[in-house]
Amino acid sequence: MISRALVTALAFVVTGAVACKKKAPAAESPAPCATCVIVTDHGFNPSLVTLRAGLPGAKTTLTFTRETEDTCALDIVFPELHVKKPLPLNQAVSVELPTDEAHTFVFQCGMGMYKSSVVVR
């Protein structure tokens, strides 16, 4: 004979397993790594990247991936660094930044409509 507690526990586990398979509401997903930026129809995600300042000559590579056609962000531009690179759909594009001292770099789409920044601390 199966006890009432066992039946209740089994029902709880089955209900929980079914509930876990439900999809969460769509939300803006975080970038997959600290130095990755995803380009969406809402701009850059994350919109602020924070990096640690390193030794003299230190550099960090940021990786940008455009995931939508519905954006004007077809290029990534770092005006201060005189860097402009095309962002092909679903292809990673790397940009190397100096991280040897504290500084804030602005990056934007080619039209300047989406702007974000990298803070080196």
Image (spheres, helix red, strand yellow):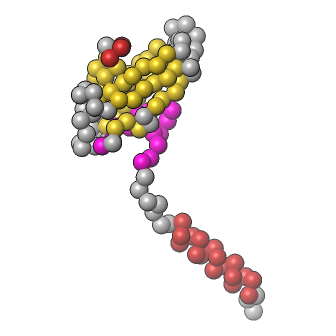
Q: Is residue 88 visible?
A: no
Which stretch did the figure color magenta? 28-41
Compared to residue 76, the image places residue 31 above or below, namely below
Q: Horizontal and vertical percent for residue 17?
A: 57, 70
Quadrant of the rendering where the C terminus is positioned: top right
View extreme (bottom): residue: 1
Left or right, 114 with respect to 3, comes to: left
Residue at screen point 39% across, 29% down: 116
What is the chief secondary structure element of the magenta stretch?
A: loop
Q: Report if residue 36 lies within the magenta region.
A: yes
Q: Horizontal and vertical percent for residue 105?
A: 42, 19
Compared to residue 103, the image places residue 72 above or below, namely below
Residue at screen point 23% across, 42% down: 69
Compared to residue 60, the image places residue 23 above or below, namely below
Residue at screen point 75% across, 92% down: 1
Q: Horizontal and vertical percent for residue 96?
A: 41, 18
Query: Where is residue 16, by image quadrant?
Result: bottom right
Q: Nearer the viewer, residue 70 or 62?
A: 70
Q: Is residue 111 visible?
A: yes
Residue at screen point 53% across, 24% down: 51
Compared to residue 52, the image places residue 11 above or below, namely below
Query: Where is residue 108, by image quadrant?
Result: top left
